[in-house]
């Protein structure tokens, strides 16, 4: 009986140690292309793409022309930090991931403005 209890304790302890902490987001769920859908007049069409290697690409319309920004991202807990390069300037932005499902990504920026993105299914 004691022989069976010891392996069971190790199994439970190892699962508890590897379980994600509260607020931790699975990075693999973030990988892929996300589309901003905003039906408000004057809203800008945009997409964000996160790669496995920690790089990010943002495509948006500016004056009717597409503009592509490249950068990097890190995900620690529920904090998503995106640093985008534009010319010689690098701009870091930090978001709180409120929800991440297979089809929807809800973010809130430092000013508490929510943004919902949808996974690109193309």
Image (spheres, helix red, strand yellow):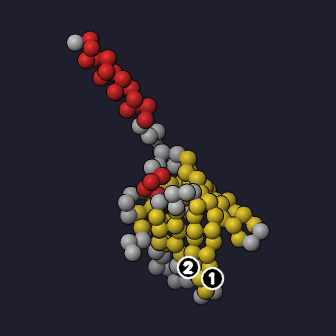
Which quadrant does the C terminus fall into?
A: bottom left
Q: Which residue is mark 1?
A: 62
Q: Residue at 51% across / 57% down in the picture?
A: 52
Q: Residues within 10 Å of mark 1 (few under 14, many from 20)?
A: few
SS label for mark 2: loop
Residue lying at 37% horizontally and 32% vertically, measured from the top left: 15
Return the x and y of residue 108 as percentages of the image width and height: 54, 59
Mark 2: few/some/many CA within 10 Å (<14, 14-19, 20+):
some
Q: Position of residue 38 (x, y in %)?
A: 48, 76
- Judging depth in this view, the residue of 103 and 5 nearest the camera is 5
Q: Residue furthest top?
A: 2
Q: Is residue 111 visible?
A: no
Q: Secondary structure at mark 1?
A: strand
Residue for point 58% across, 53% down: 74
The number of numbered badges drawn on the structure is 2
Q: Position of residue 101 (x, y in %)?
A: 39, 58
In the current view of this chain or complex, which residue is farthest to the left?
1
Q: Position of residue 84 (x, y in %)?
A: 66, 65
Of the residues under marks 2 and 1, which one precedes in the sequence? 2
Determine whether 73 is above or below 42 in the image. Answer: above
Q: Is residue 69 visible?
A: yes
Q: Nearer the viewer, residue 86 or 94?
A: 86
User: In the rendered structure, are the residues bearing label 2 and label 1 in contact, judged by CB atoms less than 8 Å apart?
Assistant: yes
Between marks 2 and 1, how big is the CA–CA gap? 8 Å
Which mark, by number, is residue 44? Answer: 2
Is 57 drawn above or below residue 82 in the view shown?
below
């Amino acid at each position: 009986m004691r022989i069976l209890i010891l392996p069971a304790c190790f199994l439970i302890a190892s699962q508890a140690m590897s379980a994600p902490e509260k607020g931790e987001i699975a990075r693999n769920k973030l990988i892929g292309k996300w589309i901003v859908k905003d039906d408000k007049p004057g809203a800008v069409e945009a997409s964000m793409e996160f790669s496995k290697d920690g790089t990010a690409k943002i495509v948006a319309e500016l004056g009717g022309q597409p503009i592509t920004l490249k950068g990097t991202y890190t995900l620690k807990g529920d904090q998503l930090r995106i640093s985008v390069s534009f010319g010689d300037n690098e701009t870091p932005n930090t978001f709180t991931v409120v929800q991440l499902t297979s089809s929807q990504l809800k973010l809130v920026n430092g000013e508490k403005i929510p943004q919902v993105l949808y996974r690109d299914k193309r």
